[in-house]
Image (cartoon, rainbow, N blue to C red):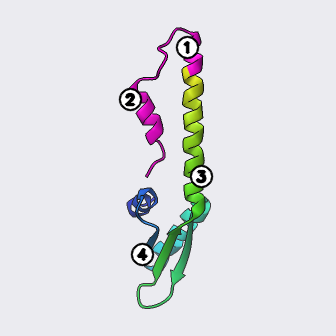
Amino acid sequence: MTTRLARFLLAANERQLDWPRAEDRRAHLHQMISQHELAVTHVTRRAGRPYVLVLTRTKALFTREAAERKTWSSDLEWLTQTARLFGAPARPTRRLASTVRGLGKS
């Protein structure tokens, strides 16, 4: 995956990326996005040269990330409760809890 595409997917404040790319690079990006089932629409705006690949993050991306965070939180709760049965501290360390909360956030 290209660095620019990865930055776009991780950026919390970017919803759309207008990316001028030559034909072979656009085709490669279209293929990668489809192959990896990324939650972005990808169309080519055919005006000027080079044509512009327009990527738009879809609501599915945010819905999926929210669901993952919910799963991680409930998993952390389960692990905490289970650990108590084996004499572990009653609460996870701050570092572990903040790491789990931060997973998947852009």
- How far apart in space, not on screen, are marks 3 and 1 (Cα)? 30 Å
Kindly tell me whether residue 36 is visible in this rendering: no
In the rendering, which numbered label is found on residue 64? Answer: 3
Amino acid marked by disc 2: Arg
Judged from the image, the secondary structure of the residue bearing numbered disc 3 is helix
Could you tell me which residue is drawn at 56 percent across and 64 percent down?
33
Amino acid marked by disc 4: Trp
Q: Residues within 10 Å of mark 3 (few under 14, many from 20)?
A: few
Residue 40 rendering spot, x and y as whole percentages = 55, 65
Query: Are dots 4 and 3 in contact, CB under 8 Å?
Result: no
Judged from the image, the secondary structure of the residue bearing numbered disc 1 is helix
Q: Which residue is mark 4?
A: 19
Chain-order first, disc 4 or disc 2: 4
In the rendering, which numbered label is found on residue 95? Answer: 2
Query: Which region of the structure is painted magenta?
Result: 81-106
Chain-order first, disc 3 or disc 1: 3
* Placement of 29 over or under 97, stated as above or below: below
- Where residue 94 sits, quadrant-wise, is top left
Q: Which residue is mark 1?
A: 84
Amino acid marked by disc 1: Arg
